[in-house]
Image: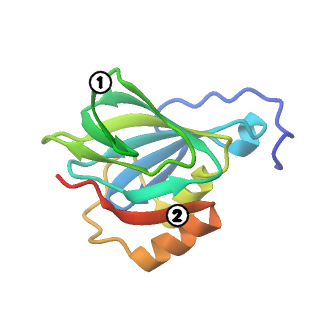
Amino acid sequence: MECGESSAPVVRPQGTGSLIWTRGALLELKATRAETRGAYGLVDELLPPGFAPPLHIHYGEDEAFYLLAGQVRFACGTERYEATAGAFIFLPRGVAHTFRVVGEEPARMLNLLSPGGFERFFEQDGVPAPDYVLPPDSGPADLAHLRALAAHYQCAIIGPPLAP
């Protein structure tokens, strides 16, 4: 289905969207670009303690996060933010950002990508998950692969993850 063709509602109980294991995390695609007429992609993320993507810049979309559980430290430009359950964080396109799950517990957050499309990055970066559980430790990310995939989605990896 192409962007803009869907006119049906999307109803997706927990664990019924596409489940993806990527870099030690479990992601569930709640809504895709094709399902929202291009408006956004929505990803439910279950992230292990210490999870931290590299510093990066999105050129094609804004990102927003709503933290459902856990504690996450965000960096956007030169600012740092500590977030706990109930926090909302908006990260505008064109500004370098990253985050790190802090503490001993996993974090769970909703990631809204607007406009939609970047959720396909996660599909291509990961593998289908058999169930709604965190994956076994996958080791370090292949940075060359990550950079090439990010570039395909108008995103640039420009630095290391946020330090603990």
Taking the image as shown, residue 152 lies to the left or right of residue 89, namely right
Q: Position of residue 122 (x, y in %)?
A: 52, 57
Residue at 58% across, 41% down = 62
Considering depth in this image, is 83 or 59 the residue closer to the camera?
59
Q: Farthest residue toward the top?
A: 86
Q: Farthest residue toward the right?
A: 5
Taking the image as shown, residue 68 lies to the left or right of residue 136, namely right
Considering depth in this image, is 38 or 15 the residue closer to the camera?
38
Q: Amino acid at mark 1?
A: Ala
| Residue underneath mark 1 | 85
Q: Is residue 129 visible?
A: no
Q: Position of residue 41 (x, y in %)?
A: 62, 41
Residue at 63% across, 67% down = 152
| Residue underneath mark 2 | 156
Q: Is residue 94 visible?
A: yes
Q: Farthest residue toward the front?
A: 78
Residue at 59% across, 68% down = 151
Residues at marks 1 and 2 touching, judged by CB atoms closer than 8 Å: no
Q: Is residue 87 above or below residue 42?
A: above
Q: Amino acid at mark 2?
A: Ala
Q: Is residue 5 above or below residue 121?
A: above
Q: Is residue 142 above or below residue 122?
A: below
